[in-house]
Amino acid sequence: MKSNTIHYRTIKAGDMNIFYREAGSQDAPVILLLHGYPTSSFMFRNLIPLLAEKYHVIAPDLPGFGYSDSPSATDYSYTFDNLAEAMQDLIDTLKLKRFALYVFDYGAPTGFRLAMANPEKITGIISQNGNAYEEGLGAAWSDVKKYWADPSQENRDALKDFVSIKMTRFQYEEGVADVSLIEPEAYTLDQYFLDKPGHLDIQLDLMLDYRNNVAMYPKFQQYFRNKKPKLLAVWGNKDPFFLPIGAELYKRDIPDAKVKFYNTGHFALETHANEIGHEILDFMNGLDK
């Protein structure tokens, strides 16, 4: 069987059934891929085969996303602390001793919590439009910020359109020079899960809790300064949510960080998976095993 064959697995980790994609040799260095909103590990479908030629790749779906458990918002508290706890349970269940982290969007505050809790396990960090600086929050956050400041039912209801197909497609297409490169299956699958019963409340709860990520940005930055993890930022420079300054600021805390921009939007892998994949392979080649 080829090393880049992708396996689709579900494992009990803590109290959750976590779905994940896995490829590559079990003996190779590990890279853990953490997706963001509103997608799943499906976003890595084109990247995994590239990385799996040399690395053991694991890409889980976060609770409430994709094919992992999605308990109702009345039965489970959808916070980024809890998403990180679920991923910690996965790391412990799979007995991962050392790994590099790829973080995107929601995967960034989830992954940075893991990095802070497991500094000895982290070989390096790849941040693809994964923000850790307040300056990096774009104007597209304005309605969400209103909800943070006043979590009223009115402001919550105003965000319902955020989970509509129009907004999902906006996230994929905004800033992309040639939208014919965007596979419609990507946003169609995302929308399938967003439209399932109960998922609106799941996403609105996470949007509210994102304010706690912003409050933790200084702690993430302190981790960067103290531990100086090897870091590669690969960034779609037309992202309306996470601005290029968010990538550049990593170098303030990790002077040796490498920052690479691509002429595309938020979901940079949709248009630049091959280029980003080879940049990651170069980066991974320089990491301690």
Image: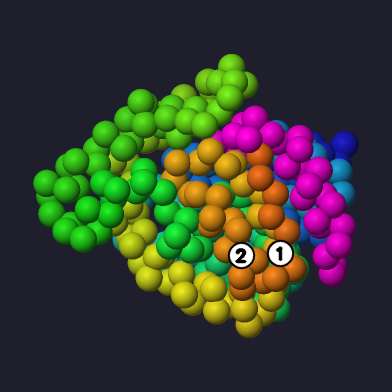
Q: Which mark is residue 257?
A: 1
Quick check: is 15 in the magenta stretch? Answer: no
- Amino acid tagged 2: Tyr
Residue 163 on image: x %, y %: 33, 36
The structure residue drawn at horizontal position 43% and vertical position 72%, both measured from the top left corner, is: 216
Residue 7 on image: x %, y %: 71, 40
Q: Residue furthest bottom?
A: 226
Pick whichever, 109 or 33, lies toward us.
109
The structure residue drawn at horizontal position 18% and vertical position 57%, both measured from the top left corner, is: 151
> Marks 1 and 2: in contact by CB < 8 Å?
yes
Q: Quadrant of the N terminus?
A: top right
Q: Residues within 10 Å of mark 1 (few under 14, many from 20)?
A: many
One can see residue 42 in this view? no
- The secondary structure making up most of the magenta span is helix
Q: Earlier in the sequence, mark 2 or mark 1?
A: 2
Q: Which residues are magenta?
A: 263-289
Helix, strand or loop for disc 1: loop
